[in-house]
Image (cartoon, grey):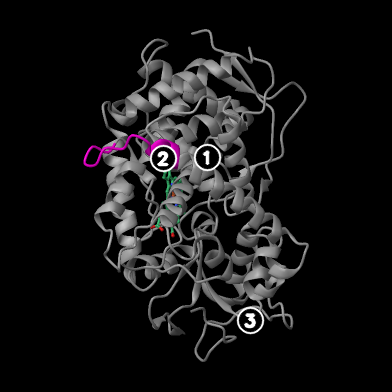
Amino acid sequence: MLVKQRRPRGFPPGPSPIPVIGNIMSLATEPHVFMKKQSEIHGQIFSLDLGGYSAVVLNGYDAIRECLYHQGDVFSDRPSLPLFMKMTKMGGLLNAKFGNGWIEHRQLASNSFRYFGSFQKPLDQKILEECMFFVDAIDEHKGKPFNPKHLVTNAVSNITNLIIFGERFTYDNCDFQHMIEIFSENVELAVSGWAFLYNAFPWIEYLPFGKHQKLFRNAAKVYNFLEQIIRRFSEGRVCNFPRHYIDDYLNKLDKSAGNLGTPYSRENLIYSVGELIIAGTETTTNTLRWAMLYMALYPNIQEKVHMELDSVLGSEKSPSLADKKRMPYVEAVLHEVLRFCNIVPLGIFRATTQDTLVSGYNIPKGTMVITNLYSVHFDEKYWCDPGTFSPHRFLDSNGNFVRREAFLPFSLGKRHCLGEHLARMEMFLFFTTMLQRFHLQFPPGTVPSLTPKLGMTLQPLPYSICAVRRQQ
Ligand code: HEM
């Protein structure tokens, strides 16, 4: 259960709450920035009143490492928020309570990613095939302005589609695209003021208006679509010969039939498939969209990327993962995009599994915990001039790539991102395949806004870009 009491004894301090709604209103615009500013007043660990229940906010690398890494078991639950309970009944994978159900679902997904990722062909070969569809589709714009959002989304989602369904979907599959669109609208709505209000006052479910109603309608449509598509792709399943994640899950479900404690169910399959699709698509897509935008914004950085690609690959050879270590500048650019753009600025909300003590504060079992990953990437103790976009911070004086400690775009601890390895492969191969062929520039006289669109993830506002074929 959530900690309903307002600031229990020994709890971290925080900004003064407004009666009834607490600090909810302060989260309306750029909550990650608001929280970092509050940490300068109240300390790295402070609390917020979210209208009747309290949340602890962790800021800066030291506090996040202390809790997520050194007290890994304690900070690995998800909060039983009314919204999450309504959406996934705290089952599935990403939203699952810390325990056997989560362990089984995480293990099954990890095994599937490893096995079906490389089923019949190595995964990087499969990603490269998708990269070819992607650059061909870019080429169709013939250097004229286009909004890359849908194209990047379709290409990136196809990598998880291969693992989950064993197939890619063509870029004109309107039903799948519509599902992703309303699902990603929900990623935005899940941290809107209405979502926080619903968590504090679940009875607003019965109000006929409010953005939370849209969220519920979207979720019903997404689950309906997923149910149908899962049925379609499980046709012809042969036990012990799984073709993809869905077969594997259904085999487990069959084997556990009659076992009362089993976490496998048709419902949890739908939730897990939805979570894997959206967690895999929204994040990597936004990273690549930011990367394209920053390449056009900083032609000098793009030129260095081109030079490295030309010297390692030339114009004919396709990139491979083995080339990564020979491309320190590309690696530095992709790391700086992840640091600077903060794709998942507040991580995914956590909760404590037991009472604990951190930096002298008491944090009771069941407390909701917000990990401000943005504050890690802008932590002045670890980053010099964090507000400047500079890939050089990931290079040593000889131009070699250097890992940085306070770099946590995939979070830390037991619930850290399950898809980090896959995401890194996708980003590298899509980015290098695209920049090997194209010069990215904004249409003459335009410079897009750098202000992110807010949600669980930060994405660029829609922008147009020209991808002009390079003459090498
Ligand atoms: C969780 C970031 C790509 C699947 C997370 C979390 C973050 C994150 C910050 C929260 C971890 C926590 O609770 O503290 C990212 C970024 C990505 C990316 C920045 C790309 C650039 C992917 C991909 C997949 C994926 C490609 C899979 C297809 C998941 C899952 C979880 C998760 C299943 C929940 C893990 C759990 O609760 O055990 N990710 N992610 N992510 N991510 Fe990713």
Secondary structure mostly seen in the magenta stretch: loop
Q: Are marks 2 and 1 in contact (CB under 8 Å)?
A: yes
x%, y% of residue 311?
Answer: 38, 16
Mark 1 sits near ligand 1, with its Cβ under 8 Å away: yes
**Is any atom of residue 342 visible in this view?**
no
Name the residue furthest bottom. 9
x%, y% of residue 113?
Answer: 32, 42
Q: Nearer the viewer, residue 450 or 132?
A: 132
Mark 2 sits near ligand 1, with its Cβ under 8 Å away: yes
Residue at 61% across / 58% down in the picture?
190
x%, y% of residue 212?
Answer: 69, 61
Residue at 53% across / 31% down in the picture?
154
What's the residue type where badge 2 is placed?
A: Ala
Q: Residues within 10 Å of mark 3 (few under 14, many from 20)?
A: some
Looking at the rendered structure, the secondary structure element under dot 2 is helix
Looking at the rendered structure, the secondary structure element under dot 1 is helix
Q: Which of label 1 and label 3 is nearer to you?
A: 3
Q: Which residues are magenta?
A: 231-242
Compute the Cα span from label 1 to label 3.
35 Å
Residue at 26% across / 65% down in the picture?
259
What's the residue type where badge 3 is placed?
A: Gly
x%, y% of residue 437?
Answer: 50, 15
Mark 3 sits near ligand 1, with its Cβ under 8 Å away: no
Q: Which residue is mark 1?
A: 287
**Tag of residue 52:** 3
Looking at the rendered structure, the secondary structure element under dot 3 is loop
The earlier-in-sequence mark between 1 and 3 is 3
**Tag of residue 423:** 2
- Let me know if residue 241 is in the magenta part: yes
